[in-house]
Image: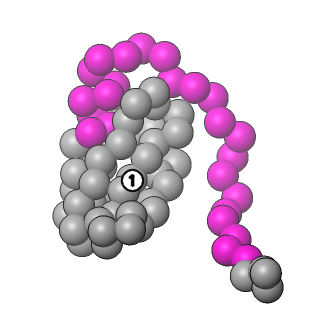
C-alpha cells in the first residue's frame, strides 16, 4: 500500500515570464519552468527530492485559497 501526502504548492509568475513553484511546508523546496505543465512535473520531482533530504515537514493550516485584489493607488 502506497502512502500519499498532500502538499500546498504556490505558483507565481516572475518578471521574465517563468513560472515559479514553492512548497511552503518543505524548507527550500522550489522550482521553475516556462510552462505550467512542465512546472507541475518538475514540482513533483522536487518534492520527492526534498522528502529524501529532510525529515521535518512543517505543519501548515488547511489551505483555503488565494485572492488577488486590485487597489487604486
Q: Judge whether residue 27 is colored magenta.
A: no
Instruction: Write down the residue under mark 1.
Output: 21
Counting from the top left corner in percent of width and height, residue 6 is at 48, 44
Which residue lies at the image location 70% right of the left edge and 58% below the top edge?
64
Q: Front-most of 73 and 53?
A: 73
In the rendered image, the quadrant that contains the C terminus is bottom right
Counting from the top left corner in percent of width and height, residue 52 is at 27, 21
Which residue lies at the image location 24% right of the left edge and 71% below the top edge?
35
Q: Judge whether residue 66 is colored magenta.
A: yes
Q: Front-most of 1 and 21?
A: 21
Q: Is residue 18 left or right of residue 6?
A: left
Q: Looking at the rendering, which quadrant does residue 71 occupy?
A: bottom right
Residue 37 sits above or below residue 11 on the image: below
Q: Which residues are magenta?
A: 46-69
The colouring scheme, among rainbow, by chain, secondary structure or one colour, is one colour
In the rendered image, the quadrant that contains the N terminus is top left
Which residue lies at the image location 79% right of the left edge and 85% below the top edge?
72
Which residue lies at the image location 46% right of the left edge and 31% below the top edge?
26
Q: Is residue 55 left or right of residue 46?
A: right
Counting from the top left corner in percent of width and height, residue 62 is at 69, 46
Amino acid at each position: 500500500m502506497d502512502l500519499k501526502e498532500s502538499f500546498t504548492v504556490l505558483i507565481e509568475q516572475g518578471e521574465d515570464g517563468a513560472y515559479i513553484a514553492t512548497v511552503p511546508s518543505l524548507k527550500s523546496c522550489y522550482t521553475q519552468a516556462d510552462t505550467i505543465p512542465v512546472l507541475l512535473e518538475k514540482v513533483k520531482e522536487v518534492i520527492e527530492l526534498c522528502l529524501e533530504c529532510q525529515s521535518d515537514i512543517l505543519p501548515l493550516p488547511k489551505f483555503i485559497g488565494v485572492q488577488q485584489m486590485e487597489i487604486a493607488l
